[in-house]
Image (cartoon, rainbow, N blue to C red):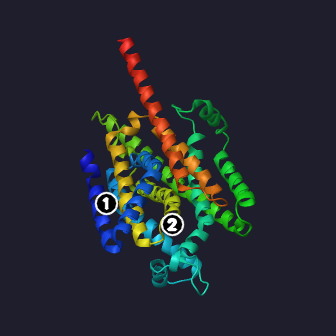
Amino acid sequence: MVLRIFGLSFVITIISLVVAFFYGGTEAVLLTLILGILEVSLSFDNAVINATVLRRMSEFWQKIFLTVGVLIAVFGMRLVFPLAIVWLTAGLNPVDALDLALNPPANGAEHFADGSPSYETIITDAHPQIAAFGGMFLLMLFLGFVLEEKELTWLSWIERPLERIGKLDQLEVVIAIGLLVITAEWIAPDDKRATVMVAGALGLITYIVVNGLGELFHTEEFEQDDEAEEGAETAGNGRTGPSDLAKAAGKAGFFLFLYLEVLDASFSFDGVIGAFAITADPIIIALGLGLIGAMFVRSLTVYLVRQGTLSEYVYLEHGAHWAIGALALILLYSIGTHVPEVVTGLIGVVLIGAALVSSIIRRRNEQAKELTAA
């Protein structure tokens, strides 16, 4: 099972390192490997959340996400996205933007001799709007989880009170907009306030629209399936158990696919920006973050779904959402102050690790109770 799921990722890793060697020698191989490890460490919470959504999708849409979605993640977010920022902000055509990326100033300077900014400088200057969009999207995802009433809680001392106040209609939107205003007013640079507000509002709108459409069509198809199931029982065929349409298909599957792609993009923002602290070469970033990192995140997502890990370790989803909340706040804070990538990665690892340990303890306690009862 493990070899079948992760086998392709290992093959892609070897191919990527070989390509990196012929592209830039030993140094390129080392940088590619570092970026791959960085992406996996930053995106473990991404894999957990992807798995919680992916298991709601039909087999067809799962395959679409794991094929087409990989191409979007690799070439869209890790290669085209940084170039698109240069196209839009510097007014360069695609060919000139790629040339700018492949030919940085000498000695790692931020500007060329004529005073024009480097590729890395343009990307870094665009960080406030990128962080505002991604931070608001992830913040809404976190608030939607912690404010929703759940049968099982992990940090009950804080999750239960949040669930009670979460009964107030649209509270997550109110909190998100309040934090966006605070970020724009007191954290963002003076010349970026309007930009941060617009980008943050777009992140908020994107979450509401994409998530809302996915839930809408999933609910409609689920209700239609319930009616079909009742009709089948009336006809006396005795069908029982979970229905085939209980997993999102059709329109519901499509919008969940879009939701996952936007979610993956939001998670990718910090990795793409953080990569420029290591290298500004778009080819190495695409190899390390895209091919190696994205493929392992996809494999990890599949593993979690196929193994039923989220059902076995019940607090993993909670830990991932708390890690998302921390990442959202870090993205918003990073608009005004640089946050080291190691801090971002460690917070996610610590929270998910704690959730995993709590899950194991809970499982052992339940097993002990069953043995005592027997």
Identity of the residue drawn at 53% across and 74% down? 108
Element class at badge 1:
helix
The numbered dot on residue 159 is none
C-alpha distance separating marks 1 and 2: 21 Å
Q: Residue furthest bottom?
A: 114
Q: Which residue is mark 1?
A: 13
The one of 283 and 43 positioned closer to us in this rendering: 283
Identity of the residue drawn at 59% across and 83% down? 116
Percent x, y for residue 111? 58, 79
Vertical arrangement, residue 99 with respect to residue 306, above or below: below
Q: Is residue 273 left or right of residue 193?
A: left
Residue 290 shows in this picture: no
Image quadrant occupied by the N terminus? top left
The one of 328 and 232 positioned closer to us in this rendering: 328
Percent x, y for residue 66? 34, 57
Q: Which residue is mark 2?
A: 276
Of labels 1 and 2, earlier in sequence is 1
Image quadrant occupied by the C terminus? top left
Vertical arrangement, residue 90 with respect to residue 311, above or below: below
Callout 1, which amino acid? Answer: Thr
Residue 68 shows in this picture: yes
Q: Residues within 10 Å of mark 2 (few under 14, many from 20)?
A: some
